[in-house]
């Protein structure tokens, strides 16, 4: 039974489920994205006193908060109760690349302890990732008018050209960071 729980859903199940949800959201006039949830939280907290960006009827977007809470709970459940016990089948070139940046046993676990632990959080590298990375993600999300999930899933489903441009930019930025910046930081 544990193997069934930890196995990822096949594309032919997950893909149609995402499609059904996106069609329902389009029919009900809703847009999907995590960054709009943060805007709702800030508006509830009184940020409208500081910026007009947060001045809107946040009660109309309360469903986003339920989605965000579900995402956090789902992530907690998945990481604590549904992680597979077997090693990840990685390409040998990927294994060598990860060893070169300090990952001792690439593929042995989904979240390598060399990166994902509380001790790393208070190091210069951890602060760089959390503070600078968080600022860049926040700035990029605001500048692009939405986050990766909002543009890549909701915006593309709605055939919005700005979402296509933003999604292409996200992927190009991710490839640049992965291949040219991250190896020097790790």
Image (cartoon, rainbow, N blue to C red):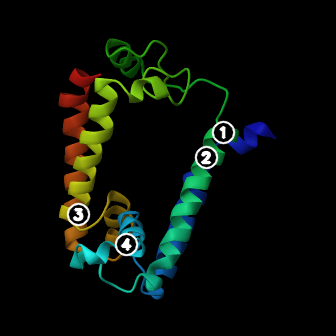
* Residue placed under numbered mark 2 in the picture: 76
| Mark 2 in CB contact with mark 1 (< 8 angstroms) | yes
Placement of the N terminus among the 4 image quadrants: top right
Residue 117 in view in this figure: no
The secondary structure type at the circle numbered 2 is: helix
For label 2, count other residues whose C-alpha is less than 10 Å away and answer few (under 14), some (14-19) or many (20+): few
Residue 80 in view in this figure: yes
* Residue placed under numbered mark 1 in the picture: 80
Looking at this view, is 119 or 49 the one in front? 49
Q: Earlier in the sequence, mark 2 or mark 4?
A: 2
Residue at screen point 56% across, 62% down: 69
Give residue 17's position: percent from left, percent from top: 57, 66
What is the number of the mark on residue 157?
Answer: 4
* Residue placed under numbered mark 3 in the picture: 142
Measure how far apart labels 2 and 1 are at the Cα level: 6 Å
The secondary structure type at the circle numbered 4 is: helix
């Amino acid at each position: 039974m544990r193997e069934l729980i930890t196995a990822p859903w096949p594309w032919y199940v997950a893909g149609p489920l995402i499609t059904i949800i996106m069609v329902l959201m389009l029919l009900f006039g809703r847009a999907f994205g995590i960054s709009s949830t943060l805007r709702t939280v800030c508006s509830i907290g009184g940020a409208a006193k500081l910026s007009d960006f947060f001045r809107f009827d946040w009660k109309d977007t309360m469903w986003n908060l339920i989605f965000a809470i579900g995402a956090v709970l789902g992530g907690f459940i998945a990481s604590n109760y549904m992680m597979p016990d077997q090693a990840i089948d990685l390409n040998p070139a990927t294994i060598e690349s990860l060893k070169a940046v300090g990952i001792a046993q690439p593929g042995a676990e989904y979240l390598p302890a060399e990166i994902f632990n509380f001790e790393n959080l208070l190091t210069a590298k951890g602060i760089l990732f959390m503070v600078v990375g968080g600022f860049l993600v926040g700035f990029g999300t605001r500048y692009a008018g939405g986050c990766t999930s909002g543009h890549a899933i909701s915006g593309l489903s709605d055939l919005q050209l700005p979402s296509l441009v933003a999604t292409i930019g996200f992927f190009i930025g991710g490839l640049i960071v992965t291949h040219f910046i991250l190896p020097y930081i790790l």
